[in-house]
Amino acid sequence: MKTSFLFAVWPYIAAALLVVGILIRYLLVRNRVSSITAEMSEAWVTFGGSRMWRISLALLFLVHLVGLCFPRGILLWNGSTIRLLLLEGFAFAVGLLALAGWASLMWRDLWRSSQSPTSELLDTIFLSLLFLGILSGLLVAGLYRWGSSWGVMTLTPYVVSLLQGRPAPSFVIEMPFLVRLHIFSAFCAVAVLPLTRLAGVFVWALHHGLELIAWPISAASQRAEAWLRKHNPASWLWPEED
């Protein structure tokens, strides 16, 4: 398999699998609110972990998001050596906390019985991909210094090219193996996610999001129906003859 395929085509396949998979799971349970709530509860038990795990993942996501959205701001911040060291040290420390949280989560799951071996296997695959992403990110930070600077100059344009529908894998295929592994494992985790119990969180969010959208439409239609009943135009359009 060519490297260009992994970084030019596979990201779109992974995104399509995520969207289609979540939609299918929602359609299967949309008329059973109790099933949606049960899936949400199972996802929390399986992936919720400790507070350290949740906070570290949220911070890692935020750091990556800031790098993607504000690359110039990152470069300006890194213009000072002290600020550069602070950012690199903070990101590395958060990565270590995420790795420790992952280990704690896996240790707890080893002693928790599961009613579905298939779900357990898929959850383990997803968590293994998360581990691969976290570990490769830490190794990149340790072996290739100042990643916050060269990352926004290479990886941010790559992600932007994907969002624009004009993938530019050349930004990635010349990068070190660990960098490519970090990116590829992230796309694999996205593709596998709909098959895991974590998908219950997205199904629950989709269900309530659609409810919020449908509520004003339903309320408006009910008000329109009530107004039509009160001001029925049939009485003056087709008056009854005496």
Image (cartoon, rainbow, N blue to C red):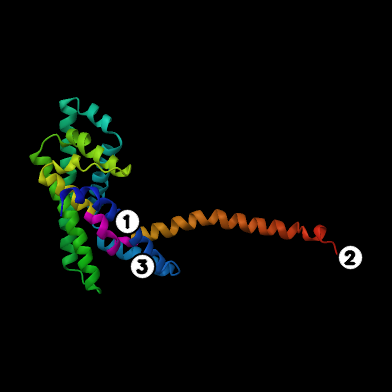
Earlier-in-chain disc, 2 versus 3:
3
**Which of these two is toward me, 123 or 43?**
123
User: Is residue 96 visible in the rendered structure shown here?
Assistant: no
Residue marked by disc 3: 38
Residue marked by disc 1: 16
Name the element at disc 2.
Answer: loop
Q: Nearer the viewer, mark 2 or mark 3?
A: 2
* Amino acid found under the numbered disc labelled 1: Ala
Q: Name the residue located 28 percent from the left edge and 41 percent from the top edge.
A: 161
Judge the density around disc 2: few (<14), some (14-19), many (≥20) Cα neighbours within 10 Å.
few
Residue 97 location in percent, x, y? Answer: 17, 48
**Which of these two is toward me, 111 or 81?**
81
Residue located farthest toward the top when viewing the structure as drawn: 80
Name the element at disc 3.
Answer: helix
User: Is residue 82 visible in the rendered structure shown here?
Assistant: yes
Give the main secondary structure of the magenta stretch. Answer: helix
Q: Which residues are magenta?
A: 188-200
Residue marked by disc 2: 241
User: Is residue 13 positioned above or below 165 on the image?
Assistant: below
User: Is residue 111 positioned above or below 127 on the image?
Assistant: below
* Amino acid found under the numbered disc labelled 2: Glu
Residue 44 location in percent, x, y? Answer: 30, 61
Image position of 99 (left or right of 62) = left
**Which of these two is toward me, 104 or 126?**
126
Name the element at disc 1.
Answer: helix
